[in-house]
Amino acid sequence: MAITSITDTTTLSNGVKMPWFGLGTMSTGQSDEEVAEVIKSAAKVGYRSFDTAKVYKNETGVGKGLKESGVAREELFITTKLANTDHGYDEALKAFDESMEKLGLDYLDMYLVHWPVPGHLESWKALEKLYKDGRVRAIGVSNFLGHHLEALFKVAEIRPMVNQYEYHPLLTQKDLLAYNKAQDIQVEGYYALRDSQEIPEIIEIARNCKKTPAQVVLRWSLQSGVVTIPKSTREERQRENAGIFDFELSEQDMAVIDSLDNEKRRNPHPDEVKVSK
Ligand SMILES: NC(=O)c1ccc[n+]([C@@H]2O[C@H](COP(=O)([O-])OP(=O)(O)OC[C@H]3O[C@@H](n4cnc5c(N)ncnc54)[C@H](OP(=O)(O)O)[C@@H]3O)[C@@H](O)[C@H]2O)c1
């Protein structure tokens, strides 16, 4: 699988094309203006996919930045998520409308159930309606393990197209990745950069490839078939993180990184997440 450009896409199970690479937007600023500046600098670098969520409290800033970037709407791929506090059929529809209002959009590219907490199966029916009504081009889940997906399949008329979860060299969950692939669900990983840049094996591979540790980890994700959404508020790092389309890791380098897994989870285990207002 050759991924050679920031605009290269993976084709989801419903035929929608989603960029392999995007910007995470959690903690990108205190004010809408600050967030908007981060979005605009990423758009200038060439980012076209942006990942936000109601709980990041930045949808207004993200929407403002996208509008001011001048990038045509059809070039963008915008994801937001249904919060744990908004489950239920009517509640989910309302939360979607509120997110769209803040983002200033008339359609969304992807809407995800943020965590598999109680009520999410009712919410899924709302996501299916939004999808059928053409208000969102793809629907999916986040932080779902195999058993959550199996329970969802029992009630779903439309299966999730994406599962976004914590994925980095110290937490690869190889069985979960294989399961998602077998179910034709595209995995999107988060926290790629959090712990991996200090790992000696990654530093060594980076030296040999004449790349930075961040670039090696992000490239490893893509070559593993996992969409990646690193976050940076700084333009020079946004550029560095996007500098991963002109090299390829060898099979041996991939195997070294794959062997680093020690099940180090940063976020709560999906079965233990607490719902709080
Ligand atoms: N679905 C979920 O439950 C969930 C949970 C967590 C996150 N997410 C999504 O995933 C995205 C990524 O997660 P994240 O933002 O927490 O973590 P991340 O992208 O793994 O790492 C971001 C951190 O690394 C720093 N950084 C970025 N590029 C760097 C580079 N080239 N060299 C050194 N440091 C660098 C950033 O600082 P600077 O900004 O100062 O550069 C920031 O502190 C989030 O923004 C969010 O969109 C989803």
Image: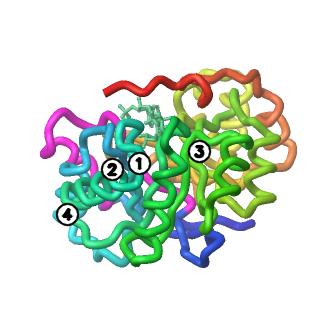
Which sits in the foreground, 39 or 138? 138
What residue does disc 4 label?
A: 104
Position above or below: 234 against 36: above
Task: State the extent of the magenta-drawn residues as a range.
Answer: 20-43
How are the colours assigned in the image?
Answer: rainbow
Q: Mark 2: which amino acid?
A: Glu
Ligand 1 - quadrant of the structure image: top left
Residue 112 on image: x %, y % = 47, 53
* Image-quadrant location for residue 181: bottom right
Whichever of callouts 1 and 4 sits on the residue coming sooner in the sequence is: 1
Kindly report the distance in space between the C-alpha atoms of the residues bearing marks 4 and 3. Answer: 26 Å
Place of residue 127 in the rendered image (x, y in percent of width and height, measured from the top left): 45, 61
Q: Tell how many labels.
A: 4
Q: Can residue 253 be seen in this view?
A: no
Q: Do the residues labelled 2 and 4 touch (CB within 8 Å)?
A: no
2 or 4: tag closer to the N-terminus? 2
- Mark 3 or 1: the one toward you: 1
Residue depth check, mark 1 versus mark 4: number of the one nearer the observer: 1
Task: Check whether the beta carbons of the residues at disc 3 and disc 1 lie within 8 A of each other.
Answer: no
Q: Is mark 2 on a helix, strand or loop?
A: helix
Q: Eyeballing the image, is 271 above or below 122?
A: above
Label 1 sits on residue: 88
Determine whether, in the image, residue 260 is placed left or right of residue 107. Answer: right
**Which residue was labeled with disc 3?**
189
Residue where numbered disc 2 is placed: 91
Closer to the camera, 48 or 77?
77
